[in-house]
Amino acid sequence: MPIYTTACPRNCYSTCSFKVLVKDDKIRSIEPHGENKAAGEGVCLKGLSYVERVYSKDRILKPLRRNRVSNEFEEISWNDAIEIIAFKLNEIREKHSQKSVLYYSASGTKGLLNGVGSSFWKMYGGCTTTYGDLCWSAGLEATRLTLGDNKHNAPWDLENAKLIIMWGKNPAETNVHQIKHIDNAIENGARLVVIDTRRTESAEKADMIIQPRPGTDGALALAAANILIHNDWIDKEFIANNVFGFEELKNSIKDYSVEKASEITGVPEGQIYKLAELIGTIKPMTINAGYGMQRYTNSGQTMRAILSLISLTGNIGKPGAGWMFANLQTGIFDSVKDPIASYPPKNADGIFRVSIPTTQLGKGIIEQTDPPIKMIWVERGNPIPQNPNTNKVIEAFRSSEFNVVIDQFLTDTAMEADIVLPAKSMFEQSDIIGAYWHPYIQLRQKIIDPPGEVKPETEIYYLLAKEMGFPDSEIGENLPFPSDETIEKFLAKKLEPFPELSLERLKENPVIAPGHEEIAFADLKFPTPSGKIELYSEEANSRWNVDSLPTYNEPVESAKSSKFSLSLMTPNTKNRIHSQFNNLELIKQISAKPVISINPEDAKRRNIKNGDLVKVFNDRGNLTIEAGLTFSIKAGAVSITNGWWLKDGATVNILSADRETDMGHGAAFHDNMVEVEKV
Ligand SMILES: Nc1nc2c(c(=O)[nH]1)N[C@H]1C(S)=C(S)[C@@H](COP(=O)(O)OP(=O)(O)OC[C@H]3O[C@@H](n4cnc5c(=O)[nH]c(N)nc54)[C@H](O)[C@@H]3O)O[C@H]1N2
Ligand SMILES: Nc1nc2c(c(=O)[nH]1)N[C@H]1C(S)=C(S)[C@@H](COP(=O)(O)OP(=O)(O)OC[C@H]3O[C@@H](n4cnc5c(=O)[nH]c(N)nc54)[C@H](O)[C@@H]3O)O[C@H]1N2
Ligand SMILES: [Mo]
């Protein structure tokens, strides 16, 4: 049986390498690839379910057209689909403007070929696009402002840490391969602290579990920083040489007492003190900041406050020490290094009108005038369940004249399309992918031909460009001709500047990105304006209008300001990637139905018993789902995992506000108060 090396392109820390066994042109099984030192222990259940996903009976295999009256889809030919879309593109450009077309893409798959979309839209004369990010941009920006760059030690270096703080990250579900490194560190004598409003599986081996009230981690960090300074548990020499703004921070937090922080966070005073003591006395320490606590309106400042703890103790640039948040060291092909670069108003008048915030997609589409949005094109994304304020996003899609969605399945977003085009799977076209946790560059290899009439996006754009009559010379330069050979040539050209990388090599193994620093910031060079770690950041203030120093501000929606009394968190979960995988039989067997986790104290007050159906509501909408009583969640908070489809009845973003984080134009998903009552 032929065996191929490939890598999973989902938006996931692990970005696993694996081997695929093929017989009679069909994928038979998926096996681990031993060469990936970060994610060595095999694929997760989602990975194993690819065997089903590729051949799923629900996969879209032909273009579909929706009848807006009956709401039924009918299969149409590629010729018809391309003709209809080209006609609409011409019509909209003539009647309105090319900027009446919104090109929306999200995190459905990684790959360099994703860039061909922009090449096509450039040839069309431009279009409207979005800015900001659903995922991590508050943390990215806080890290960039503080350290100057988003990079961290190699994943396996965590085994050198003597203190690991897992802060708002749940690797037992979202980065399963990290657990091995944590276990090895613990065997080597490391202590583990987990800071999460929920007591998750990741806390099983923890020495200490801290459960702050949602969105209050900034106060916890500032109090811990104050204790460190007060007890002289800081690295004065490191600070003198490498830290900018120490005196200012020291003064600004001198009244941040343990009592005050305890009152804000709901964390016992003794625990706050103990946390500071561990940080102050055990070295080396790695803080692995996850994405959970950066989904609030105060998140950038929270992340800066947490960053101060590694800065004050000199825990960076050494084995076992550092700030693990995002490792963009595989971004060697990116022309733009600043991930927050393409913001308005800078680009609002360029070819691309970058004018609609991803976090306010519905509102942005509806409110855009001059020109208004008439057509929406979606690929690699499922914004109806995944973007904030689902009802508004649905309204926006319905207000647009003509929508095209490319996807493998009839998702909630595809259901709002006039034309649905079938999307390739990861096995049906080669591409090169990076990662955001480990340092490997990998080839996502073409292994089988697409089933049915599926065509990769590159081919869709090529056919459309031809139909639109774009000059051959321009097409040739911008869009690879749709054959395996030209795609390989296109990829090989991208690899040319890097002699270490070749398609032949990548066909066998994952390869560490050229220039990779196993220990990030070992040279103690921080590309910030002062050249030092910036506790005090002028840019934080000038760019985002927050205090130049890290501060704690109460989340916009909280028990203090809202008429609703429970904070709703909507984290990620083990057996889905957002809205993907849950439609597969294998996955359904073990994650059958949505549940809201609620503390028995909160449940009792509402006369809710385990398994009861409850209504979860606020002014934005409501859901009816089953209650799961558990002491693992802090009283005052409730939790439903995100990614459920509308038909599952638990699309959490029906309840979320389309609010931005304080920096990075991120989505404040968890800044979301609700009430729960028995139905
Ligand atoms: N299996 C699986 N893996 C994934 C994904 C997936 O969907 N499924 N998604 C991938 C992507 S795109 C991302 S962004 C990452 C995200 O993965 P993680 O970094 O783990 O982030 P989240 O799951 O958003 O949240 C992590 C934890 O933060 C906690 N939390 C929420 N609010 C607070 C708070 O105010 N304070 C503290 N201290 N904790 C809080 C939640 O309870 C949750 O357990 O995972 C990636 N990996
Ligand atoms: N309430 C709440 N909402 C959240 C979050 C949260 O924590 N709470 N997390 C947020 C985060 S971290 C993220 S990253 C976003 C994710 O938001 P999205 O990126 O929109 O999420 P997915 O559900 O992964 O949808 C990706 C879609 O791409 C499709 N797809 C996969 N491969 C291909 C391909 O090759 N071509 C095409 N055309 N399509 C493909 C999939 O079938 C799927 O429908 O969700 C965010 N939403
Ligand atoms: Mo994400």
Image (tube, rainbow, N blue to C red):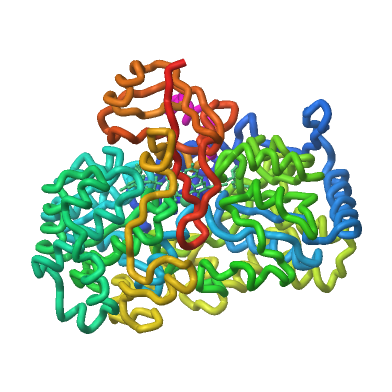
Does the magenta portion include 209? no
* Residue at x 87% of width, y 69% of height: 471
* Residue at x 27% of width, y 52% of height: 166
* Residue at x 49% of width, y 46% of height: 20
Residue 496 appears in the figure: yes
Does the magenta portion include 583? yes
- Residue 107, image x and y in percent? 55, 52
In which quarter of the view is residue 131 placed?
A: bottom right
Q: Main secondary structure of the magenta part?
A: loop
Q: Is residue 237 left or right of residue 601?
A: left
Q: Is residue 104 left or right of residue 20?
A: right
Extent of the magenta region:
579-593
* Residue at x 22% of width, y 84% of height: 241
Residue 6 appears in the figure: no
Q: Is 196 rendered above or below residue 479?
A: above
**Number of callouts:** 0
